Amino acid sequence: KEKERKEKERKEKERKEKERKEKERKEKERKEKERKEKERKEKERKEKERKEKERKEKERKEKERKIEREKGEREKGEREKGEREKGEREKGEREKNRKRERRKRERRKRKEKERKEKERKEKERKEKERKRERRKRERKKRERRKRQKEMGEERHKNIF
């Protein structure tokens, strides 16, 4: 009887031990499952964050590119406008210079013409002066000859 009781106790003990081990195993499995689930969720959260970060970075870069493009277009427009204005300014300057040069040439031409005219008049005046002097000399010469001739005739009369 005692033997049976002991056997019964031993079996009961084994059964309890088995249940306890089974319980522990199930608990361990449950915890492992929870841990894996937690890791999976954490991984998903990180992936989501990474994608969001990439999306924001892409948007920021696109915005920067757009700003740079607009800035480039604006600068190009300003540069073209500046070059156009510079071209117009230089064209105006060239036109002014051409007019100035033309005026200078015309003034030089006019001065040269005036100088030549003055020289011609001076030459004419000198020529007239020379002719007048010559006529004066010739007249004096004629008068002197005439006087000498008369004097010669007078002398001839006196001699005879």
Image: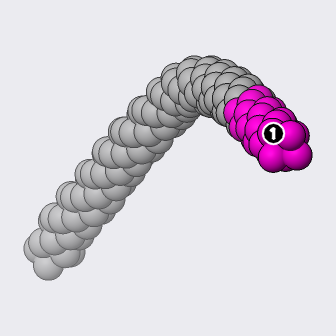
Q: Residue at x 21, y 69 (%)?
A: 148
* 20 falls in the magenta region: yes
Whether 9 is drawn above or below 91: the answer is below
The quadrant holding residue 50 is top right
Q: Residue at x 19, y 75 (%)?
A: 155
Residue at image mark 1:
4
Residue sticking out furthest to the bottom: 159
* 100 falls in the magenta region: no
Question: Which quarter of the figure is the C terminus placed in?
Answer: bottom left
Q: Residue at x 81, y 46 (%)?
A: 3
Question: Which quarter of the figure is the N terminus placed in?
Answer: top right
Mark 1, secondary structure of its residue: helix
Q: Position of residue 93 (x, y in %)?
A: 53, 34
Q: Report the amino acid beneath label 1.
A: Glu
Q: Is residue 139 visible?
A: no
Q: Position of residue 137 (x, y in %)?
A: 27, 63
Whether 67 is drawn above or below 36: the answer is above
The quadrant holding residue 66 is top right
Q: Residue at x 14, y 78 (%)?
A: 159
Q: Is residue 2 visible?
A: yes
Magenta-highlighted residues: 1-30
Q: Position of residue 80 (x, y in %)?
A: 52, 24
For label 1, the crowd category at 10 Å Cα-Cα, with few meaning under 14, some 14 to 19 and many 20 or more, is: few
Is 25 or 151 nearer to us in this picture? 25
The image's colouring method is one colour
Q: Position of residue 125 (x, y in %)?
A: 38, 48
